[in-house]
Image (tube, helix red, strand yellow):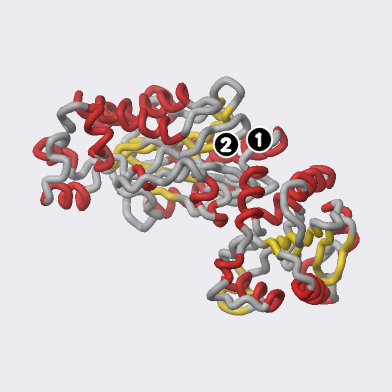
Amino acid sequence: MFEANIYKERRRQLKSKLDPGIILLLGNKDSAINMSGNVYPFKQDSNFLYFFGPDIPVLAGVINLETGEEIIFGHEPCMDDFIYKGVVPDLEQIRQYTGADQAMELDRLGLMLQKAVHQGKKIHFLPPYRGETKLQLYQLLGINPLEVDHHVSIELIREVVRLREIKSPEEITQIESAINLTGRMLLSNMLNIKSGDSEKHAASRARQVAEAQTSTAFPIILTTKGQYLHVLPDSSKMKNGQLLIQDCGAESQLHYASDITRTFPISRTFTSLQREIYEIVLAAQNLAFSLISPGIEFSTVHRQVGLNLCRALKDMAIMKGNPIEAEAAGAHALFFPCGLGHAMGLDVHDMESLGEDHVGYTGDIKRSRQFGLNRLRLAKALKPGMVLTVEPGIYFIPELIAQWRKNSLHSAFINYEALDRYQNFGGIRLEDDVVVTGEGCRILGQPIPRTIDEIETIMS
């Protein structure tokens, strides 16, 4: 945990912006795999972590917006805790960690909330993403689990986004430590990959690097089928001539995420065609880095990258016609059917449980309905302190190409005959994490091989 005063200051800022009532922040519980004693690795709720801090199951935090009182709820350790878990902090120790005013047994939470409801006070809570949390809200507030999403506090969502989207220096330090560990995950395969390895073997090698210190922030995406955006590793054997996409992230000690992607050749050198496509993606990423600055809307960065891709693909005779018109029509989405990046922090897709439109859009900036552009997770104006991923790519998806070709979609801009050459190409993605600064952006973490020369040199 950070020092208690950091959590107290975060709660102070949260309290200052909301109407009277009660803020309820529920921590997560253990989730059973197949019985109560056999559980998945514990993952604390990120909003509870942000405002209170303890990485311990079965806790809840309450902030009274009228009195300013802050209470942490939990259980005193029992005999089974000592037998199975060893030293477990008691409620008073947890209160001290958080800087809350009081600590109470969790059994008292329901009575406190019911009293507040009877007095006509608003209970502010965030959208639950686990079934057991919906049941807990039913027990505490009597809200039908099927209707709970209609009772969440939009005011609280907006204030949480406002606070969490700007990262403090302490948070940046945590994110960079996670990125540095992720770099070692990628290097473990750049240095050791060979033809005949299975994807699962390569993913296991990378996972061991992370789990030796912390854990992974999300399941490792690792595949030679790079035309598809999020393919998990299987038992397929890798072959010379193929490209491997490894999209992975470690967590820091305090659970801040990282998200880095590299594409590299199994044979340790790129073919001439692979080099040509790779250089287009690299140039697109460099363009995005140069554009990111305070005040620019990320949707503008995304579209400028799309225009750059249109021009480069026209130079390769994959696309044709006017690049400006092609980008406006969304023709390039055949090769780039996703967004350029997303916010990142305690969640790898930061705060996505609160609703992507709350995190990445505003009342004035609405999500596009255009294919490709509609998948942009972050569109609003950037501010200093925001952390986001930058991940352009080019993907040759045979099924999508066949569908568009059958319908002659964007035939004025796409040279479908030229695409026969790319049926088995796969895809290339590059991803790094940046923080928006006062004048531009800074790539976070220690450098990870990114150019063709850097990758081929380290792999040799």
Tag 2: Cα neighbours inside 10 Å, few (<14), some, or many (≥20)?
Answer: many
> CA separation, marks 2 and 1?
8 Å
Q: Residue at x 67, y 62 (%)?
A: 125
Q: Residue at x 79, y 58 (%)?
A: 63
Marker count (numbered): 2
Q: Quadrant of residue 13?
A: top right
SS assignment at label 1: helix
Q: Which residue is mark 2?
A: 387
Front in this rendered view, residue 327 or 242: 327
Q: Which residue is mark 1?
A: 172
SS assignment at label 2: strand
The type of residue carrying mark 2 is Val
Q: How far across and how far down the image is residue 143, in percent?
A: 63, 76
Q: Quadrant of residue 326?
A: top left
Q: Is residue 330 left or right of residue 319?
A: right
Q: How far across and how far down the image is residue 175, in percent?
A: 62, 39
- Of all residues, the one furthest to the front in this rendering is 120
The answer to whether residue 299 is visible is yes
The answer to whether residue 241 is visible is no
- Of all residues, the one furthest to the left in this rendering is 417
Rendered view: 74 above or below 144: above
Q: How far across and how far down the image is residue 229, in percent?
A: 36, 48
Rendered view: 157 above or below 409: below
Q: Residue at x 82, y 47 (%)?
A: 8
Marks 2 and 1 close (CB-CB < 8 Å): yes
The type of residue carrying mark 1 is Ile
Rendered view: 183 above or below 371: above
Specify the quadrant that holds the C terminus.
top left
